[in-house]
Amino acid sequence: MEPAKHPAGRAMILGIGTANPENYVYQADYPDFYFRVTKGEHMPDLKEKMKRICEKTCIKKRHMYLTEEMLEGMPNLCACLAPSMDARQEILVEEIPKLAKVSSLKAIEDWGQPLSKITHLVFGTTSGLDMPGSDLRLVELLGLNPNVQRYMLCHQACAGGGCILRLAKDIAENNPGARVLAVCSELTVCIFSGTCHTHSDLLVSQALFGDGSSALIVGSEPDTTIETPLFEVVGAYQHTIPNSREAVEIHSREAGLIVYLAKSLPGHVSNNIEKCLIDAFTPHGVSDWNSLFWVAHPGGRAVLDLIESNLSLKEEKLLASRHILSEYGNMASACVFFVLDEIRKRSIKEGKSTTGEGCEYGILCGFGPGLTIESVALRSIPLN
């Protein structure tokens, strides 16, 4: 493949970093863990339901900040929808920026340039919202210049990674010399809850989500003597699917964030994603979706299965997304950058011609409340 020609000023991804809490749980053991810590052993029917849900997720393990020892001292987090926001906030306000620091330092190391060159920060999270926010706390933890321009994006949920990259692209392309640190940090502390027969629908979210943080360095016109572009950001789009508000609902209450995922969610996404692809790639003359590398948000097995089926994708196209789902679960906004990093690493390991598994173009897509689809068209970089 001939080296790609990149238009002057177009945003590039220059570094990627990911991080997770050290603690993790195996999905096969999770029903026993969950019903033990939530004192729910008197509900064997719900435990059996949780086992069936866990088996269907195709998740092998998930990282969680919360441990059994911690939860023993927080009974309201383990009760079904008990008032517990204060206890959750005390954890989230401290730990979300701390986890973000780890992924940010990895992205900066991957980029290979000093902290002093970062000019902008875009920080996204679904919880732990205080003012001043996690963005300022991260500036302090990293020791960034206090004049770094900060943007805080809240409650984007699983569409957040695409939204954050869309904003980082605009900043990089409209501010000469800008180097943007774009970070997503998510902890399930915000949603962990016990269950009961009247709220058994909560079991799905308890079985699906995991903790993680991911970060990118984004800038235009890189100095290739000291910076190595990984992917070019050629376009970023947001689509809101009409009449789909019920597909994902997340309500902020005294009991934390209450997540409702409708059975219609996979269908809404799979039935509308091709329009997003057409809008993103018609300008580039691409209409074969199997010619793309895929950075699809691993929101769940059913979503990935229907996207693959409806678009007639080859099995290998969603392997990176399925791998991240298996190893980490759904980490909300942080997921897509984990998938992007996985694709970059696989491309190098397998000797592909580009950072995008040998493909020239790729799609990064996230799906969140609205129902909102964030689509980012990427172009890979040739590997020497």
Image: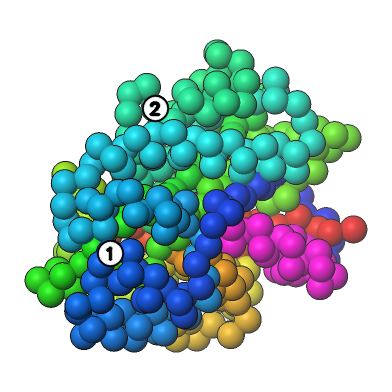
Q: Which residue is mark 2?
A: 133
CA separation in Å, label 2 and label 1? 31 Å
Q: Quadrant of the N terminus?
A: bottom right
Q: Residue at x 20, y 58 (%)?
A: 79
Judged by depth in the image, the label closer to the viewer, 2 or 1, is 1
Give whichever of 80, 239 is nearer the camera.
80
Residue type at the position of mark 2: Gly
Q: Quadrant of the C terminus?
A: bottom right
Q: Which residue is mark 1?
A: 38
- 202 lies above or below 56: above
Left or right of 144? Residue 156 is left
Q: Where residue 29 appears, x then y in whole percent?
A: 45, 77
Of label 2 and label 1, which has the lower sequence position? 1
Left or right of 346? Residue 276 is left
Q: Is residue 334 magenta?
A: yes
Q: Secondary structure at mark 2?
A: loop
Q: Where residue 30 appears, x then y in whole percent?
A: 41, 73
Q: Where residue 199 appears, x then y in whole percent?
A: 14, 68
Query: Which residues fall within the magenta stretch?
Result: 332-359
Residue 368 visible from this viewpoint = yes
Q: Hey, which residue is sitting farthest left in the picture?
A: 198
Q: Which mark is residue 109?
A: none
Q: Residue at x 33, y 24 (%)?
A: 131
Q: Secondary structure at mark 1?
A: loop
- 255 lies above or below 139: below
